Amino acid sequence: MDGTKPYTKNDRQTILSSCDSGEDATQIAYTDALSSNIAVNSKIRKKLTFQQASLKMAQNLIK
């Protein structure tokens, strides 16, 4: 989300769209991290997987 861009109170849809784009980028980052060949402790991998799923559920709730 671009926090430097001025919004008015009538820009609710613009703000939600901007947040949604940020959430999509976050999901891609989680997917990239979890699918990389870097060795990750199983506890950390489990936590990242849980965080990604939680963020996705929250994003779907808002949509």
Image (cartoon, grey):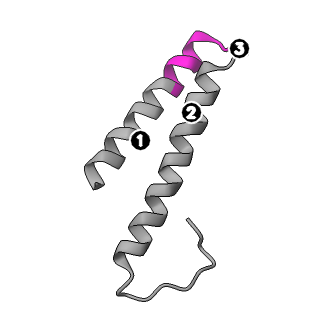
Q: Residue sitting at 35 percent across and 87 percent down? A: 10
Q: First in sequence, mark 3 or 2: give its number.
A: 2
From the image, which quarter does the C terminus lie in? bottom left
Residues drawn in magenta: 37-48
Q: Position of residue 58 (x, y in %)?
A: 33, 46
Confirm whether the magenta stretch covers residue 59.
no
**Residue position for label 2:** 30
Q: Where is residue 9 in the image (x, y as percent from the top left)?
A: 37, 87
Q: What element carries label 2?
A: helix
**Residue position for label 3:** 37
* Gap in angstroms between the C-alphas marked 3 and 1: 23 Å
Which of the two marks, 3 or 1, is nearer to us in this view? 3
From the image, which quarter does the N terminus lie in? bottom right
Say what amino acid the circle numbered 1 marks.
Leu
Say what amino acid the circle numbered 3 marks.
Asn
Q: Are marks 3 and 2 in contact (CB under 8 Å)?
A: no
Q: Residue sitting at 51 percent across and 39 percent down? A: 27
Q: Position of residue 59 (x, y in %)?
A: 36, 48
Q: Residue sitting at 48 percent across and 50 percent down? A: 23
